Amino acid sequence: MDNNNFLVIENISKSFGDNKVLENINLNISKSEFFGLLGSSGSGKTTLLRILGGFEKPDTGRVILDGTDITKLEPFDRPLNYMFQSYALFPHLNVFNNLAFGIKENFTLKEIEINVRNIAELLSIEHLLNRRIKQLSGGEQQRVALGRCLIKKPKLLLLDEPLAALDKKLRSKTQLELTTLQKKLKITFVFVTHDQEEAMSLSDRMAIMKNGLILECSSPEEIYENPKSLYTANFIGIANIIEIYKKDENFYSDDLGINFKLNKKLKNTKTNILLRPEKIKIQSINNLKTSSFNSFSGEILEKSYLGSFTRYEIKIKNMIISVLDQNFNSSSNYNFPKGGKVICSWESESIKVLED
Amino acid sequence: MKNKLFEKYFVFSPYFWLVLFFFIPLAIIFKISISVSEWGMPPYQDIFLFDNGFKINTTFENYVYIFSDYYYIGSFVNSLILALISTFFCLLIGFPLAFYIATSNIRLRNILLVLVVIPFWSSFLLRVYAWKIILQNNGILNVILLNLGITSEPLQLLYNQYAVIMGIVYTYLPLMILPLYGYLNKFDLNLIEASKDLGLNRIKTFYKVILPLSVPGIVAGSLLVFIPVVGEFIIPEMLGGSDRLYYGKILWEEFFVNRNWPGASALAFSGIIILVLPIVIFQILYSRWSQKNEI
């Protein structure tokens, strides 16, 4: 068995009644990979994770972990652990006994004590061991839930919305901790999220799911820069989607009333293109004249100052284009005023064609 | 101002209820239990006599009488055993049912809950009488058993302690299921999955997670069944035989057959004290325990 096929998901389908939740899912996940399943609610991502955990049985297909077919195994026979979105900590047990819950069977008292201490130290929760679950904050509960799984030294850890229950500030801190921990322990993590930022920052690779299908599976960079479908382009980040069609040598957009120059040949005469807002250069109208292609002049409709960036909504003809402009200068009057006219331009390489 | 006053007294309404319908009747029973019995109507003497100056006319003879005769104590013990066994079987049948109802989907759950409650819509007496018809020598059950060739002659299913237990379990089962359902309904099913995920099989998950977290429901349901069964009169009377005497029956006989009101009152009062005192102590200890464990 090679490392690239540590977890193999093969032709998994699942229906609840007439409702097809997963259709023919295929995924290969490498050893020690931090893998994200991203999708909106109803995309089937949680069902897929629950199938991996053994809580749901797939209608068809197989799950192979480290060379062993685990499709028919009960959750308690699988060498993996599942961290619940609600954490599902046992309210009748204190932190120590929650952590020790999964190892009480096979270890002596002394071994349990050592293991619990070690895992508590790893997650910096040594001071909480005698607490009741209700006495813990959300962040502390998340650590206990994580520790309760990690103490079993699983081959695979499944995480259902691991950060959803935390407040925003704690979330970014925990994100970093989670990645560091994963790289340190080298355990394969598969997690589910509806939050694209979370998926981007945690995942080595991620799969975009919609209506029980995997639309795309790649690294966050690849998915952001070169999305294959319109859905992915819109789902990840801010996207300007423009419909263009072939006109003479170049391409033309009716909505913008301008010409586009593309680097590559197109299959169709009509297609959608993606232009990410940070790829667009914004300049004062005094500096330049508009070029005949890949550029337009428009009016600033809205602007919002975001600290490191300013986001502009620029109106041209029938369309509103989003532009993110990095705030290089420290002077506050650097920004373009609302209602002002500006010139926007971009490189041909920045135009991504959405063929699907 | 008016609302405030209303609220103030409204808070006391449960106590008012308790005093009116529990403590006052209890006091009356206690009063009769320490009176001297006589032939007449009512069949006891007043405890305060005024004819030759003021005199308190009380006796503890009635208590001595019932506690010195095993006939009375024995019937009470029989009732306690009956209540224990019935509660156990109610729990044994009720727990899986309540768990199944609580974990099924909302439509099925509502149907099942209605099915649990439906027997309450018909008369209690009729339901017990129906069992008499089912269990009697030429009843449905015996006819089926005979036709299937399982027995060659009708079985004596009625008029013994087993029929009584069966009747009680049947009648009191909803009282066990409903409070249990109330607790299990709030049960986070993820906890069961988490336990399995951490390597515990179904049986271990039951003992380590489901059972400890269901204790409040089990206690509530068990008390609701146990207490009334101790004083149950109708079911042993209709389905039971002469093999065992129960407390409720003795009480009835003492009041209405022997017309020994003071003796019967002494028996009733002792029964209440013996039953209520341990339960009150248990409740205090239990509420402390559950507060400590935050269940």
Image (tube, coloured by chain):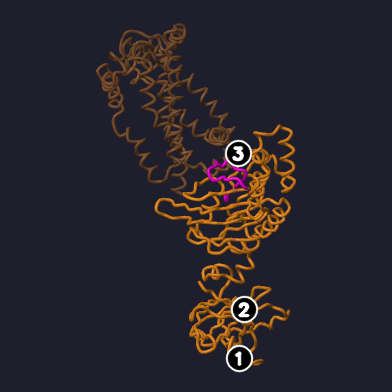
Chain colours: A orange, B brown
At label 2, which amino acid type do we have? Ser
Counting from the top left corner in percent of width and height, residue B128 is at 31, 24
Label 2 vs label 3: CA separation? 51 Å
Residue at the far left in the pictured view: B138
Q: From the image, tell me which residue sits under label 1.
A: A291
* Label 1: which secondary element: loop
Answer whether residue A297 is magenta in the image: no
Q: How crowded is mark 3: few (under 14 residues within 10 Å), some or many (20 or more)?
A: many
Q: Which residue is drawn at 59% across and 83% down?
A: A338
Identify the mark at residue A350; answer none if there is no mark: 2
Residue type pointed to by label 1 = Ser
Q: Nearer the viewer, residue B76 or A220?
A: A220
Q: Residue A214 carries which label?
A: none
Q: For residue A178, which quarter of the picture?
A: bottom right
Is A73 a magenta residue?
Answer: yes
Marks 2 and 3 share the same chain: no
Specify start and end residues of the magenta stretch as a single range. A67-86
Residue linked to disc 3: B199
Does A232 sit above or below residue A321? above
